[in-house]
Image (tube, rainbow, N blue to C red):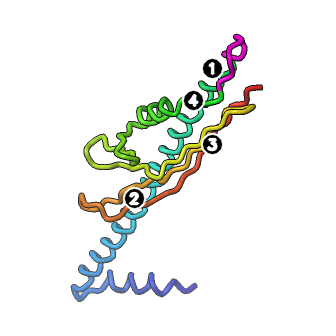
Amino acid sequence: MRENTVIRKIKRICTCSKGGSHIWTVVIMLSIVIIFAGVLEVAQIISLASGVRKDTQLVIDSFVTKTGQQIFSSISNGDDYVDDLDEAAFYQLFESELGLEDSGGLYYHSPSGADVFIISDLDVDFAVADSVKLKMSYTLQIPVRAFNKNVTDIEIPMTLRADYYLK
């Protein structure tokens, strides 16, 4: 059975008795460490994006449920039917639950001074008819850092929905 030629070359370089193998061994190990660091960075970004999505969905669900229950309660008590939602209350809940700071349409999450993530292009659509509906779309920007410097930002578009049926 023949081994892969790349693996044979690596074995030959690492077992060379002329003294040059030490440099190549270090180069190979550093390459493996850099690849491993890249994989861990991607895993961290995926985990952060998933967490932000879950937290945002929780905020949307709780707001829609609370608003739907208030509308249902007011109808049950014979009060007028309210067909608008308190957008200011939603944004306040969104900012407080996710620990965000509003800066003119950009929402920053930076608990230790460095930006962990930024939410931009926020678009929220409310609708009340037979149900309370909320659709939220935004762009999640996650800075990729190396050696305490921002290398680039990864932008992930997200769209979330929540419905609460009144009947």
Whether the residues at callouts 4 and 3 have beta carbons within 8 Å, the answer is no
Camera-near label (3 vs 2) is 3
Q: CA distance from mark 4 to mark 3?
A: 12 Å
Whether residue 59 is in magenta: the answer is no
Which disc number belongs to residue 161? 3
In this view, 14 is above or below 94: below
Ranked by sequence position, the earlier of labels 1 and 4 is 4
Say which amino acid is labelled 2.
Glu
Which disc number belongs to residue 70? 1
Ranked by sequence position, the earlier of labels 3 and 2 is 2
Say which amino acid is labelled 1.
Gln
Name the image quarter holding residue 80: top right
User: Horizontal placement of 81 versus 151: left or right?
Assistant: right
Q: CA distance from mark 1 to mark 4?
A: 12 Å
Residue pointed to by mark 4: 62
Name the image quarter holding residue 57: top right
Q: CA distance from mark 4 to mark 2?
A: 32 Å
The stretch in magenta equals: 74-82
Q: CA distance from mark 3 to mark 1?
A: 19 Å
Say which amino acid is labelled 4.
Ser
Residue plotted at (35% across, 48% down): 116
User: Helix, strand, or loop for circle 4?
Assistant: helix
Residue pointed to by mark 2: 41
Name the residue at the right extreme. Answer: 167
Name the residue at the front extreme. Answer: 80
Say which amino acid is labelled 3.
Arg
User: Helix, strand, or loop for circle 2?
Assistant: helix
Image coordinates of residue 23 in percent, x first then y, are 24, 80
